[in-house]
Image: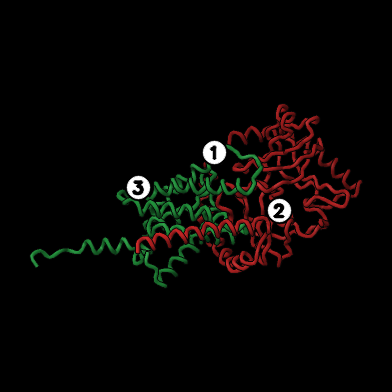
Amino acid sequence: MILTPKMLARLVAILVLGVILQLSFFSQVALFHVSPDLLPVLVISLGLLGGTMTGAVTGFSVGILLDCLLVAPLGGASLVLLATGYLAGLFRERFEIHSPLVPPLLCMGLTLFAELGFGAVELMLGTDTAVSGLVVRDLLVKSVYAFVLGWPIYLGLRRALRPALVEESTVRRARRPTVLGA
Amino acid sequence: MYRKQVRRRRAVLALLIVGSFVLLTVTYGSGSNGLQRGVSTIFSPVQSVADGALKPARDLVNWFDQTFDARGRNSRLQSELRKAREEAVGSNAALAENAQLRKLLGLDRGGAIPSGYEPVTGRVIARSPTVWFADVTIDAGSGDGVRVNDPVVNGDGLVGTVSSVTGNSAQVTLLADHASAVSAKVVPVAVQGVIRPNVGDPNDLILDFIDSTKHVHKGQAVVTAGWRGQGIESRFPPNLPIGEVTRASIVEQEASQQVHVRPFADLRDLDLVQVLTGGSRG
């Protein structure tokens, strides 16, 4: 990802808007008693578009902002989201995205990874209460929501950040018509 | 060139991971810090505006959820209604008797909120996104008189407690959060215990550490114990309604010293809450 000051501002605005939307809207709505989690999807999509560093840095930043606004111990969400973004970026650097199903499926799988990661951080911090079996249902439904949200968010971000995407410009160059016999 | 780039990437990644662990170690258990207070102060007005603007959309989505839910609950509620009607006659008589007794004892304070507490109303402006935490942020803070450990209620009963405060917002740890523990008693049998969450299921709390020799029954109400003695006292005033016992098997009571409680307040769907500020707590 080639970050000019304008693109950086756009990226920061997207992240802040994402966090505010999550806290003020997605966390407060429930379908089948489960709230969608937009933030892993956002970070995964950015990782898929920009690579490992973009995924990791945006995951870390989103996590810090989230922890600040929730007045939670700093670092927990950052750790989980940076790992999630990094893994998405790693996929982008190792494999081609051939099918439109790949981003939503990755969002689904990595959101499940992120939610389990939040649980692992909880355990690390010493949770000693009972855990209901309904957690499993909630995690799976959240992953399904991530699948649904994955494609539109991925497409929206690709459109918004198109000038900064390395691959996009490479593809555009490659598609220039060649003049035969010149 | 490529190797240099890879080394730089690895260094940034390692820095971020180490940074996360350092932040976690430094800030865990220390309440709100300067950075959080600053960010919260900047974003609280934005969150309030976003909360107000997105309320119609939220209500629409939640309406669908509640409609699906209502269809399932309809038959159960009808049978409960029949039972409640039967009990209403007896309850009215008991209420009349109770009112007389309260007057006689001089305990009638004329409201659900205990005397000495000043309620501060706040609106929920943010909610933790993961299933592991059950925290909400409200738009009332230290500027409104809210302090850490103040109890938080809504029209149905106890909701949680204030865990951290900034100038114009406060973090409320709900009863369903893993960090929550409330001393409570079952009425009328006066069995005491500690209300703890069953993480992931906000409709199921656990009344733990109860006296296994006294049996608790399904349908009995659970309220805050509000104990005091030897210079210390509970964070919660006595008799704030918490919920009702939903599962109370003799085996579980005797083996695990616990029963299951459904909170009166719908912890998934909170909008307006009241923080009980002041009081005589230390």
What shade has chain B been given? red
Instruction: Answer with left or right where residue A45 lies relative to residue B267.
Output: left
Question: Label 2 belongs to which residue?
Answer: B161
Q: Position of residue B243 (x, y in %)?
A: 71, 42
Q: Tally the numbered discs.
A: 3
Question: Label 3 belongs to which residue?
Answer: A101
- Does residue A165 sit above or below B70 in this rendering? below
Q: Position of residue B40 (x, y in %)?
A: 61, 65
Residue at the outermost right position: B104
Q: Position of residue A71 (x, y in %)?
A: 62, 59
What shade has chain A been given? green
Closer to the chain start, of discs 2 and 1, is 1
The kind of residue on which mark 2 rests is Thr
What crowding class fits label 2: few (fewer than 14 Cα within 10 Å), some (14-19), or many (20 or more)? Answer: many
- Does residue A78 sit above or below B208 in this rendering? below
Q: Are marks 1 and 3 on the same chain?
A: no
Residue at the outermost bottom position: A5
The kind of residue on which mark 1 rests is Arg
Check the picture and name the quadrant holding the N terminus of chain B. bottom left
Closer to the camera in the image, B225 or B217:
B225
Q: Are marks 3 and 2 on the same chain?
A: no
Q: Position of residue A145 (x, y in %)?
A: 46, 47
Q: Residue at x 71, y 48 (%)?
A: B157
- Does residue A67 sit above or below A144 in this rendering? below
Question: Which element type, helix, strand or loop, lies under badge 2?
Answer: strand
